[in-house]
Image (cartoon, rainbow, N blue to C red):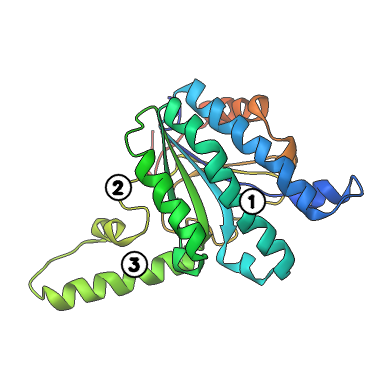
Amino acid sequence: MDKPKHVSIIMDGNGRWARERGRERVYGHLNGADSVRAVIEAAAEEGIPYLSLYAFSEENWNRPAEEVSYLMSMMNKLIIQEKPTFIKNGIRCRVLGNLGRLSSDLQQAVSRLEEDTAGGTRLTVIIFLSYSGKWDIFQAARRMAADLAAHPDKQVEIKDFDQYLVTAGVPDPDLIIRTSGEQRISNYLLWQGAYSEFYFTDLCWPDFRKDAFRAALADYAGRDRRYGKVK
């Protein structure tokens, strides 16, 4: 099997990793940022065109305010800090989700990141921020309904629904990786992941580095994707 065109990762286990070391959850988030850098480098080295990372879900807004504030601040700092590296290495960055819930400062940082890296052609990195699969499908249905109301003669098929999702223009993930031993999708890419291969690892996210990423690719290479057909 060829390498996946799009690898997506549910980054899980930062808090557990920190607790096992007698530290606060934010310590896990801080070390998890090093894993983000590592897998981006690995994806670029392996020639993977798209890498997406589930950074913060809609449900994560219900976490303690102090932790949410820290995560948003860390995201802002990482955008500013890593952007020159992305530009230098030809990496395009996109941030997808219910971005209206972000602070104005973070929204501006996201917008500048996307604009400044738009010319990158080596790898597209997608950060899902304030995202949930159910929200995405719901907002897509509303957009489609508005479009059809404005154009009553327009004919649509199920394949046309993709254009209303926030991932319009992005290929569906071939491989979805989840760390920390949990084996569920957690309201992530519910439409887009319909035929994705899943890979679960007991490693918590701060321990997931290049070797672990390549192990997931090797496992994927042994899969037989039939899409409901018989081979």
Q: Nearer the viewer, residue 184 or 103?
A: 103
In this view of the protein, can residue 32 be seen by the observer? yes
- Three-letter amino acid code at the position of disc 3: Ala
Number of residue marks: 3
Give the quarter of the figure containing the N terminus.
Answer: top left
Q: Residues within 10 Å of mark 1 (few under 14, many from 20)?
A: some
Q: Nearer the viewer, mark 1 or mark 3?
A: 1
The x and y percentages for residue 183 are: 67, 51
Q: Nearer the viewer, residue 174 or 68?
A: 68
Badge 2 is on which residue?
169
The answer to the question of whether label 2 and label 3 lie on touching residues, with beta carbons closer than 8 A, is no
- Three-letter amino acid code at the position of disc 1: Met
Q: Residue furthest top?
A: 45
Q: Nearer the viewer, residue 105 or 148?
A: 105
In this view of the protein, can residue 172 be seen by the observer? no
Badge 3 is on which residue?
140
- SS class of the residue under badge 2? loop
Give the quarter of the figure containing the C terminus.
Answer: top left
The answer to the question of whether label 1 and label 2 lie on touching residues, with beta carbons closer than 8 A, is no
Distance from the alpha carbon under mark 1 to that under mark 3: 29 Å
- SS class of the residue under badge 3? helix
- Three-letter amino acid code at the position of disc 2: Gly
Can you tell which quarter of the image residue 140 is in?
bottom left
104 sits to left or right of 115:
right
Distance from the alpha carbon under mark 1 to that under mark 2: 28 Å
The residue sitting at 59% across, 29% down in the picture is 219
